[in-house]
Structures are given as C-alpha cells and as structure tokens.
Image: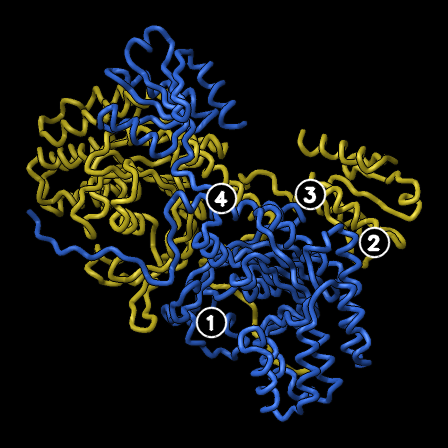
Chain colours: A blue, B yellow
C-alpha cells in the first residue's frame, strides 16, 4: 500500500460553490436576465478577468487597494477585475472607431474583491451588467430604458421589487444652495449612511463638518423625502432655485414621463432622494431595487447615469447609463431565506434500467430517446431495488425497465414514478407519454 | 481645460476579447455544447477561478510551474486554475458523501496558463468540460457515452470531425512485452511526437534510450497503426500476449461494440494507436477529434479514462472519463479560416424611428413590441437619413417610421430593409409580418 499523505480538499473561504442542483437554478437566473437584456437589443461582451494594473487602477493613480487581487507576472503588474465597468471603459476607449453608438452591451462575469470574509460578502461574485454608452451625447430616455429593463428583469425572475430612484443633482444642487459646495463629497458620505447610523447621528456628523443645525436638518429632511413620484416632486421642486438643483428636478420629471409611457406600474417605483450610491462615478439618475418584503436584503440591483465613462483613457466624451446585479449575493440571500424556485435533483425525463443481457438494446433505446428528451441509461451495477430507490430520490419522473422479453415483444415497461402507474407500450408511445408530461 | 495625462487603453496580450457580434457566435457555440451535455443528463458545476496553491499544485508537490498565475494574498498562497479537472477532483473529494454516482457534471469556465504568447495560444481560455466520475467502479460504457456525446457536440456545432480513439494499455502493454517497462514514460513522450518530428527522428530518439533498432521499429509501426476499427484491431490483436496489452485490445473491442449500438457512423471514428494525449493522467481509453479538411487545426477536442481522479485528496477510488473542448482556441481557428457562421451586427428585429413629437408614443410602441420581438427605439439625435443608413449597415430587417400622422391614423410605415417594401399597417399587423420573417 502506498502510504501517501493526503491533502485535505478545501476551497478558499468567501468563494461560492454550489451543489449542481442549485447551480441549475443559478444558471437559469442568468439565462432569464440575459434574455431580458437581449430583448432590449443589448449585445454581449466578455473581457478578460485579468487587466494591466495600470489600466484597472487608473482611478487611484495606480495605488493598489488592499482588497484587490493584484500581483506581478513576469515583468507585468496585473490585477483581477473588481467590477465590469472599468473593463467596459477600457474596451470602449480602445475600440471607439469600430463601435455603433449608443453602444449597448451586457456582460455576465466574475469579479474579485478580497475583502475580509463576512456574512453575505463574497470575494468572487458574478455581476450581471448592462450599459448604454453614448458618443458625446446620450438622451435621458436611455436612463428610463435602463430602469424599465431592470424592472423587467425582476419580473422575469419572479421577484417582487420596488425601484427607488433619485438624481444626484438634487443633493449636489441643494448643498450648493446652502453654500456648502466645498463639503459636497463629505456631506454625501454622511447622508448615504442615514439608514445605518440614524438621523440624529447624521446630524451630529454634519455639525462636526461645521454645518449649522438648521442646514443639517434641511439636508437630512430632503434626503428622507421618499414616496410617490408626483407627490414628492411637488413637495421638493421649489426648495431651491439653484441651477443644478433645478436640473435634477427637470431630469426627474422627464424620467417620470418616460417611465409612464413605458407603462411601468406606479406601485413598482418610487422617488427616494436618499438613494446616493456611495461616492462613485454617478452624476445624474441613480436607482436601486429593494424587495419590499425583505428590506434586510438591502439593494439587490443598482445603477445610474455617469457623465464620462472613460476619462482616464480617452479625450472622447462618453456618457453612459447602466444597471448592475450582483447575482452571487442575491442568490445567496434567496437561498438562505428559502426563496429559490424548486430544486430538482436531476434534469432527467427518463431513466432506462437494463435487466439481464439487454445492455446493447438499451443503448439503442437511449440513442432513440436522447434527441427528444433527457434520457439516462443506468449502467450502474447495483441491484434493481437500489436503482429504483435512487430514481425515486432523484425525482426522475419515468423509468423504463428493459428485460429480454421486452426486447422480443417490442413492448416496454414504462413506470411513472410519481403515480406508480405502469404501461406496457412501444418506444414511440413511451416518448409521447413522457413528452406530454415533461412539456406540459 | 484639464491637461490630464491619459493612459493608453490596452489589454494584456494573449487574452482573447471579441467584438460583440462575434461574442454572440461564441456564446451560441457554448449554448449548443451545453444543450448536448444536458441532453445526456449532465449537471452544471461552477468552481472558483482561484484555488489554494496547496490544492492546485498537489501533483507537483506544491512547486509552481512558471506558466501558472500563482501569488500570495495576505498569508494565503493562491493560484488561478489551469484546467477544470483538478477543481473537479477537489470538489468530488470534498463533497463525496452528498453526490450521486456516477456523478455527471459539466463545467464551462475560464482557465489560465501564462505561457509565452504565440500564435493560437491563449493565456485565458474557455474550457467546455464534461466528466463522469464513478464511486470505486465505472463501467466502460461510460467511455462510449463520452465519445458518442463528443460526436453529438460537433454535429450540433455543424463541424465535420473524425474521432480518433485508442487505449493507453496498448502501448503500455507493448512496451512491457518488449521488456521496456522501465522506459514506458520516456517512450510515450517520444511516440507522442511522431507527427511533429517524423518517423526517422523518433527512431533515433528511441535508440538514444538504448532501445535496439528492431524494437524501435516495432514501437513506431504499432503507433502508426490507424484506420477502420475492425481492420486495425484484426491487425494488432495478436501482436503480444502481454496482459496489459490484451486488456487494451479487449477494452477497444467492447468500446467498439457500444459505439456500434449507439449507431455512431463508422466513417466518423477511427482506431488510432498514435493517440497518446501527452504524459498526463489517462489510463485507458483516449480520444481526440480532428477535422479531416483541416488537419492543421490539430486536435479540437480530447478526452479519456482516468483510473483515479482525486488520489491526492482522498483514499476513495474515483475512476472517471471525460471530454474537454478548448473553445477559445477552436473559435480562433474557425474565425481565422472564415469558418464561423454568419456574423450579424445586431440581434434587432425592429427599430422604431420617431419623427417629430412622437417620442412618447414610440415608447408605448416599444413596450408593445418588446415582449414578442427584439425592438430598439432609436432615440439618437442624428438625421433620418443617417439613421436609415445605419439601420442598413447594422442589417436591421425592419424599420418602423413613426410620425404624427401615423399616431393619429394608427397606421404605421413599416419598411422591410432588405426588399425596400413599405407597408402602412396597424401595429398588430406589423408584429405579424416581423414574427413571420424572424422565426421563419
């Protein structure tokens, strides 16, 4: 005997790995999301997982965030992508002359952030992104198209969401109006946390910036404005005559008119000035989807408008709008809350069990069935009883028992595993019954 | 003006990145391969791209091949996977008690080898793998199932291939028979290169190992045996009475009988003792697909039987058989030889072009059409003429021109861009015509 030392098989922590029956559901969700993106005439893109660090870290001046998977290969500093937006920017800047604008692309791919492993956070995660990039200009209707498409995605996934929409010009402009334009970024960081830290702590933090009580209260109160689009718009539209603020109001009104023309159900979206989406690149429309029955899930989809996608790589002005769904996190939430669709242990329509010396005839039967249905030939060496027990456990709907007599007569014993009903019929009749059952 | 220094946008060399219209074809090939695997009752698996180096490099005792993308993150030595087989081994060893055997899984994913960039070699490549893993035992019919499935894959891709099949026990046993059992690995390495270096050089290299001229010629002659299964089997079956050799012959005969029962066309496979598949883990059946009209493509699919999948991680005996298609390389070959299916610049069935103040009505029309066909609303600000020219360039089959009169009358100008024919019809009639055209 070889007394070889075994290595304990294990995977990296923070990396999702599903059992195959759950992977079927994950893949099915991907297919459903992709079908919606395709339906809106988006085309696929697949960029490498690795990028030159110089490219990927342009924003930070090449400084490597501790979170990132960055390393050197030969003489080349490379980094695993942390999102799909920077690679899109690099792609559009590189291929600009050959693209049709507005350029609509979807990308489904894994991204990597090596943050400290914690509940609900993954170091490798599948992003399902779709973006529209304009050449110099991109009308606001593109924003509405993205919001409507995101709503269609959740309809396709059969998940109940409400889309919370805002426009960053509202808080930008209001801060300007209050004379706080030098503090805008700091203010947004605090306002973005209201949900977590509460109103009073937010006021405290604003006051630490030197903002007086009156202004702090006004900022908080505006941020908390949320509800029916028309009602909230009427409440806030005259709060300020600042130009940026007025631009935000006008854009929200225009967006609302488009969403109404799309026929989007008014109960499925809301104006929510508290939607800020961190201190990232968004410049206008911003939106996040929440599940009303599961506020604890947080945002399950986000997106918005950015003025200039690829400013680090090109002088071309490339405004865009996009949506992003973090499917790994969403799937994990649904799974942990027993909200996934029914998990089927196999995709098999029919399993053939050979009895006696019928293996070759069973192969011929498998070849006959497999073009029309999913047919497995059970060539395992276990007992008939064990095979039937396992077929049951795997929820295989039909089993075909093939002995020598069946071969001679051309009539096969088809068993419906759910009802227990057994037929003695030709292979053609078997196929008809199974197809009727599987595709009903 | 901001005199910002731009970073030249570029990607890493050796990484494929397709234009979206070609990515559509790549994705379509994936869908077709996946459909075949599913049809044979395989289930999906998706393992992380990163693995612990200790796990991934178990074979080499943890030594990092220069080719690999290995690095340290925090205190953890990690490595980007270089194939999908080692992760499968790790997964099966980890999850053994929860799996149904024979365990049939497919995996489509990217793998990484940082070899020197050269023509036709990619550092990131998509593998389309399917394997059947048995618990302790796996009958030889599983090998036939894999070969037949691989042939079905190429039928689905509409690519003409011939499957070259051998069994490693033939050459193993023959080397034993010649008393060369201590040199088996070295011999196989040389025999595997005959195609590249030629027969005479191969004899020279064998002689350098101390093998006499007679034995060298016998080895070469056996390796070159290739052709109709029955004919070649008859030629070689009595060459040696070595037990391993006889096992190889018996397995090939049994495999042939199964392939015949599957009804596999005899012209589509051949016995080819020269199929060796490098010095890897295969132990019995080995096969490679070649395109007869394009021998220069080399092998476009390979696979075989391995005795023990996960010996580094578990004492469990896990024999398996699998197939692997390197889709990135295959796609690149087809592309460079103009063998891809027709490339369509867009997937759009209908584009709506608003004229005058009809944008909101056009949104309603888009909402009407989009559930049934792929409908794009052209909200670009270019001239009508420019839009029509572009629709033509993008091969969009139908354009709907919507002016104020059309809205009033409810009759729309639908233009068939291929024939130039123009209809003045209701939206319902438009939908009928387009559906008839798109799904014909």
Q: Is residue B52 above or below residue B99?
A: below
Estimate how packed mark 4 is, as few (under 14), some (14 to 19) or many (20 or more) residues with alpha carbons within 10 Å.
few
Q: Secondary structure at mark 3?
A: loop
Which residue is tagged 4? A341
Chain hosting mark 2:
B
Task: Tally the marks.
Answer: 4
Q: CA distance from mark 2 to mark 1?
A: 43 Å
Distance from disc 3 to disc 2, alpha carbons, whole Å, reads 18 Å
Work out how far the residue at label 3 is from the one at label 4, CA to CA, in angstroms: 27 Å
- Left or right position of A222 against A82: right
Q: Quadrant of residue A11?
A: bottom left
Describe the element under mark 1 as helix, strand or loop: helix
Same chain for the residues at labels 3 and 2, yes or no?
yes
Residue behind mark 3: B374
Name the residue tied to disc 2.
B359
Instruction: Give the chain letter at badge 1.
Output: A
**Residue occupied by mark 1:** A53
Earlier residue among tags 4 and 1: 1
Chain assignment, label 3 = B
Q: Distance of mark 3 from mark 1, alpha carbons?
A: 38 Å
* In the depicted structure, whether residue B242 falls above or below residue B332: above
Residue B435 visible at all? yes
User: Is residue A396 toward the left or the right of residue A143 in the image?
Assistant: left
Report the mark closest to the observer, 3 or 1.
3
Which residue appears at 61% of the width and 65% of the height?
A93
Along the line of sight, the residue nearer the viewer: A417 or B160: A417
- Residue B252 versus residue A423 in the image, above or below: below
């Amino acid at each position: 005997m070889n007394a070889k030392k075994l290595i304990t098989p294990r995977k990296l922590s923070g990396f999702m790995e599903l059992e195959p029956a759950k992977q079927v559901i994950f893949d099915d969700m991907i297919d459903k999301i992709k079908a919606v993106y395709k339906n809106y005439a988006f085309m696929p893109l697949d960029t490498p997982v690795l990028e030159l660090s110089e490219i990927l870290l342009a924003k930070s001046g090449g400084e490597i965030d501790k979170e990132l998977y960055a390393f050197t290969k030969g003489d080349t500093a490379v980094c695993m992508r942390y999102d799909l937006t920077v690679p899109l920017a690099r792609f559009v800047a590189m291929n600009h002359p050959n693209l049709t604008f507005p350029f609509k692309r979807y990308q489904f791919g894994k991204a990597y952030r090596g943050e400290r492993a914690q509940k609900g956070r993954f170091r490798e995660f599948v992003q399902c992104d779709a973006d529209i990039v304009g050449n110099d200009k991109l009308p606001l209707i593109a924003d509405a198209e993205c919001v409507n498409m995101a709503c269609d995605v959740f309809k396709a996934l059969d998940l109940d969401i409400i889309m919370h929409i805002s426009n960053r010009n509202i808080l930008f402009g209001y801060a300007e109006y209050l004379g706080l334009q030098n503090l805008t970024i700091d203010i947004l960081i605090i306002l973005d946390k209201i949900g977590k830290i509460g109103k009073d702590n937010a006021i405290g933090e604003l006051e630490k910036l030197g903002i007086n009580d009156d202004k702090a209260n006004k900022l908080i109160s505006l941020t908390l404005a949320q509800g029916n689009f028309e009602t909230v718009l009427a409440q806030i539209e005259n709060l300020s005559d600042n130009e940026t603020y007025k631009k935000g109001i006008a854009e929200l009104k225009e967006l609302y008119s488009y969403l109404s023309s799309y026929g989007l159900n008014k109960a499925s979206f809301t104006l929510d000035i508290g939607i800020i989406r961190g201190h990232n690149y968004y410049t206008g429309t911003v939106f996040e989807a929440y599940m009303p029955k599961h506020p604890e899930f947080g945002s399950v989809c986000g997106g918005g408008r950015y003025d200039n996608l690829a400013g680090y790589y090109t002088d071309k002005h490339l405004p865009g709008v996009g949506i992003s769904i973090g499917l790994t996190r969403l799937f994990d939430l649904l799974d942990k809350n027993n909200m996934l669709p029914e998990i089927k242990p196999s995709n098999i329509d029919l399993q053939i069990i050979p009895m006696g010396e019928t293996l070759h005839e069973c192969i011929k039967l498998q070849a006959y069935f497999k073009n029309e249905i999913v047919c497995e030939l059970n060539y395992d060496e276990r007992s008939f009883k064990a095979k039937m027990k396992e077929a049951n456990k795997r929820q295989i709907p039909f089993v075909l028992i093939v002995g020598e007599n069946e071969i001679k007569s051309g009539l096969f014993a088809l068993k419906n595993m759910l009802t227990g009903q057994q037929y003695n019929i030709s292979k053609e009749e078997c196929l008809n019954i199974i197809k009727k059952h599987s595709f009903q």
